[in-house]
Amino acid sequence: MREVTLRVKVQLPKATEIQKLEKKSLVMYIYMGPPNNEALYGTESRIQLNDQYARVEDVPEFIAREREARNEADRNFLTTSLKVHSETKMGVVTDVKQELRKAGAFRINYSTLKGESK
């Protein structure tokens, strides 16, 4: 599994009904949250794909690259996991989900922590 240097803060929300992903090697991660360096990048939520900040328009290209890097037999089983900071506005998440639909990435997972929500 590829290690990523987080450039955004990701404080995952808590949930009670969760399931573990079976094959983590078939998961692509998209991180969303405020930048770690708010003095340089501001406080508005940003999107991180691999080790770089990205725009919403970059998501389909990211999905295409990730698919190409995988075995052809595994491509239909790829899951996109959204790791979203608990205070990120849903507008950013919705925009990313729209781009995922356009790219044909319909298997989406929201990463959470186990526990009672506030």
Image (cartoon, rainbow, N blue to C red):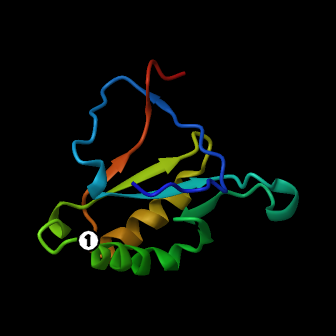
Task: Name the image quarter holding residue 78.
Answer: bottom left
Residue found 52% across the figure and 65% down from its top: 50
Residue found 57% across the figure and 39% down from its top: 86
Residue found 48% across the figure and 48% down from its top: 83
Residue 35 relative to residue 98: left or right: right
Residue in the foreground of this view, choosing between 82 and 91: 82
Furthest-right residue in view?
39
Image x and y of residue 70, in percent: 26, 71
Residue found 30% across the figure and 26% down from its top: 17
Compared to 58, does 97 lie above or below? above
Quarter the N terminus occupies: bottom left
Task: Name the image quarter holding residue 72.
Answer: bottom left
Furthest-left residue in view?
73
Task: Name the image quarter holding residue 43.
Answer: bottom right
Mark 1 surroundings: few (<14), some (14-19) or many (≥20) residues within 10 A: few
Kind of element beneath mark 1? loop
Q: Name the residue under label 1.
A: 70
Quarter the C terminus occupies: top right
Residue 46 relative to residue 72: left or right: right
Residue 35 relative to residue 63: left or right: right
Q: What residue type is labelled 1?
A: Arg
How many circles with numbers are drawn on the protein? 1
Image x and y of residue 40, in percent: 85, 63
Image x and y of residue 94, in percent: 46, 60
Image x and y of residue 98, in percent: 39, 69
Compared to 104, does 77 lie above or below? above
